[in-house]
Image: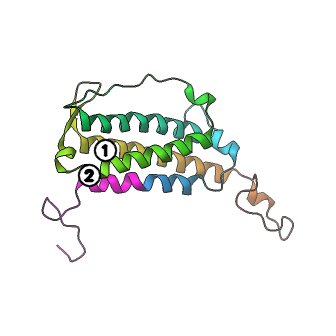
Amino acid sequence: MTMFAMPMGPDGGVDDELLALAKLEATSNAIRLRIAGMTPDQLYRGSLDELTIAELIADAVDREKVYLDGFRRVRSETNPRLNEPRPGLAFMDRGFAEDLALFFDLRRETLDLLRSFNDDDWERKVTLPNGSIVSVEELALRLQRYDAHMLKAISAQKQKFKQTTGINQLRDAGVAGKLGENIGQ
C-alpha cells in the first residue's frame, strides 16, 4: 500500500453514511452549476425517451418529500413501513423555479435531520413498500444514488443543448461581436 492509497476496512475508511451525507450536501450546488446559463426553453425541452430538466427536478422534489418523511418516521417509530407515493402528472402545473427552491429547502431539512442521527439511528431499520428491510444508512445511500442519476441526466441534456445552440455559427470574424454562451437570455 502506498502513502496515498485509501485505507480500507472499518479501521480507517470513510463510513458510508458520511460519504452519503457529503454527496447529498453537494447535490444542490451541482444542480446550480449544471443549469447555470441554460435558457428557460432548454429546461422544458425533452423527448419521449427522456425527462426534461424541469421534470427531473419535479421528480426530485417528490422523492425528497418521501425520503424526508421516512427519515422523520425513523425517529418516532420502530421499523416504520414506508409507502410508495402514487405517480401522477402533477409536475405539469408546477413552476420550475418553485420546484427548485422547494427541493433546496427540503434537502436542507433532510441534511439537518441526518446530521442529528447517532450511530444507533443509522442502523435503525425501515420496511420498504416491496417488503424488504433496510437500514437508514442504506436509505440515505439510495437517495444519493437517485441524485447521481438525476445529475447525470441533467449533464447529458446540457451537453446535447450546448452542441445545438447555434452560437458557433454566429461567431464570425467580428460579425457577431462578443456573444455569451447563453444567447437566449
User: Residue type at mark 2?
Assistant: Glu
Residue nearest the viewer, comparing 39 with 137: 137
Q: Is residue 148 visible?
A: no
Secondary element at image label 2: helix
Q: Residue at x 59, y 50 (%)?
A: 158
Residue nearest the viewer, comparing 107 with 163: 107
Q: Could you tell me residue 101's position as x and y percent? A: 55, 45
Judging by the rendered image, the residue that carries numbered circle 1 is 140
Mark 2 vs mark 1, CA separation in Å: 7 Å
Q: Could you tell me residue 83's position as x and y percent? A: 34, 25
Magenta stretch prevailing secondary structure: loop
Q: Residues within 10 Å of mark 1 (few under 14, many from 20)?
A: many
Write down the quadrant of residue 138 in the picture.
top left
Relative to 141, say whether 9 is above or below.
below
Q: Residues within 10 Å of mark 2 (few under 14, many from 20)?
A: some
Q: Could you tell me residue 27's position as x and y percent? A: 45, 52
User: Horizontally, is 172 left or right of 73 in the view?
Assistant: right
Please state, as top left, top right, bottom left or bottom right, where the N terminus lies in the image: bottom left
Relative to 140, say whether 34 is above or below.
below
Q: Is residue 122 visible?
A: yes
Relative to 127, say whether 34 is above or below.
below
Q: Could you tell me residue 15's position as x and y percent? A: 22, 56
User: Residue type at mark 1?
Assistant: Ala
- The span picked out in magenta is 1-25
Q: Which residue sits furthest front?
A: 76
User: Horizontally, is 38 left or right of 101 in the view?
Assistant: right
Q: Residue at x 25, y 53 (%)?
A: 16
Disc with the residue nearer the chain's start (2 vs 1): 2
Could you tell me if the residues under marks 2 and 1 are in contact, i.e. CB atoms within 8 Å?
A: yes
How many numbered marks have been drawn onto this rendered protein structure? 2
Judging by the rendered image, the residue that carries numbered circle 2 is 17
Q: Residue at x 27, y 29 (%)?
A: 128
